[in-house]
Amino acid sequence: MRTSRRFVGPALAACLSFAACLSVAGAVAAAPAPPAALRPLPVREVQYCAAVLGHVPGADGASPVLGRACSADSRDDALAHADGLPRVAARPADRTLLLEEYKDINYGGGVIYSFYGDAGGCDSTGYHLVNYIDVALSLSSMKGYHNCNKATLTSTLGKVETVDLPAGWLGQDFNDAVRELQVFHG
């Protein structure tokens, strides 16, 4: 059990005798542990997330999200849940991988998000992607696929910059701060 500092400081200051201090210390040490139902559950270190995007932007300028999902098992499983289509030998992949976002610089820490397009790879228009806030605050590097060789990044503070893909480090203004990006062929 964790004891508040506001309680411990005055309690120790109030100890006028050795016996009083022992009784306070014994009461704190003998407090029961919190019930198991209130303890936090262990979190898996690796989680694969995928989003399937439409190519034609919506009224807000973003590519429409056709599905999003995460899986503890694999990227293929996350994609299958995102678009509702199971992966089988006859149809191994009917979505085009556009971008993988990595937790650490130089593509370390594992892929934290994968974006797929429903209309093939990137052209000069590309796809406009929006990150979940927890992904935006964890993103440090990225790789583009299928003609996606550039990305215009928008930081969580509103800064905008275009980078070449792959990008092993996003720079000081964009490391752990990419809220939106336009991925395209340039």
Image (tube, rainbow, N blue to C red):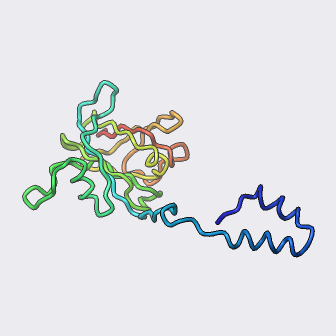
Quarter of the figure with the C terminus: top left
Report the residue at 24% width, 40% height from top.
66
- In the rendered structure, the answer to whether residue 126 lies left or right of residue 95 reads right
User: x%, y% of residue 83?
Assistant: 21, 47
State the image coordinates of residue 72 (x, y, percent, origin top left): 33, 62
Image point (39%, 45%), residue name = 164
Query: Would you place residue 91 above or below residue 31 in this image?
Result: above
Question: Residue 70's spot in the image, x, y percent?
Answer: 32, 54
How many labels, in total?
0
Query: As rendered, which of 145 and 68 lies closer to the eye?
Result: 68
Given residues 4 and 126, the one toward you in this image is 4
As drawn, the residue found furthest toward the left would be: 90
16 displayed left or right of 171: right
Q: Is residue 38 left or right of residue 124?
A: right
The residue most toward the right is 16
Question: Is residue 55 depicted above or below 82 in this figure?
Answer: above
Q: x and y percent of residue 75 in the render?
A: 28, 58
Q: Quadrant of the N terminus?
A: bottom right
Q: Residue at x 75, y 58 (%)?
A: 5
Q: Does 163 sit left or right of 81 as displayed? A: right
Name which quarter of the figure residue 17 lies in. bottom right
